[in-house]
Amino acid sequence: MSGEKTIFKKIIDREIPADIIYEDELCLAFKDVNPQAPVHVLVIPKKEIVSISHLEPEDMELAGHLFLTVGKLAEMLGLDEGYRTIVNTGKAGGQTVDHLHLHLLGGRSLQWPPG
């Protein structure tokens, strides 16, 4: 990572606004500014990790926490009909911000293949 903060780090540090819907000691969740579904939330770790490819063994608990948080948010947001969780990794995988983030999408029927 370069010395410049990502947009997600700036959100964590409250340097730029976001519609935050959940926060705990390990992660933050906020509404995507360009939603692809009626519900589109991003869940990010507060620890700066570039992508899944950059997770280390010591991040195992954090990685599990992120997925448990997605489930908690889906329940909180009433996504009992189902939802999709997406983690883009690397440029070719569609990752546009070099900070690990999970997309939680729902609120409508989601098609396959996704893209």
Image (cartoon, rainbow, N blue to C red):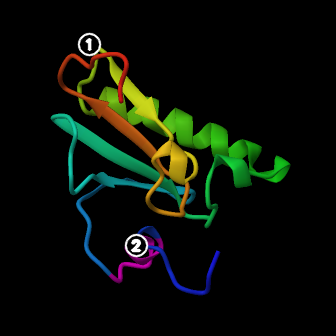
Where residue 1 appears, as percent x and y from the top left, is 64, 74
Asked which quadrant contains residue 18, the reply is: bottom left
* Quarter of the image where the C terminus is located: top left
Question: Element type at marker 2?
Answer: helix
Mark 1 vs mark 2, foreground winner is: 2
Do the numbered discs 1 and 2 sit on residues whose CB atoms are within 8 Å? no
Task: Tell me if 39 is positioned left or right of 96 in this view.
Answer: left
Where residue 12 appears, as percent x and y from the top left, is 44, 71
Residue drawn at x 70%, y 49% as measured from the top left? 53
Task: Tell me if 3 is positioned left or right of 105 in this view.
Answer: right
Residue 109, above or below 44: above
Asked which quadrant contains residue 76, the reply is: top left
Which residue does the numbered mark 2 point to in the structure image?
7
Magenta residues, as a range? Answer: 9-15
Residue 10 belongs to magenta span: yes
Near mark 2 (Cα within 10 A), the count class, few <14, some 14-19 or many ≥20, is some
Please state which amino acid type lies under the numbered disc 2. Ile
Residue drawn at x 25%, y 33% as measured from the top left? 77
- Residue 88 appearing in the image: no
Mark number, residue 61: none
Mark number, residue 81: 1
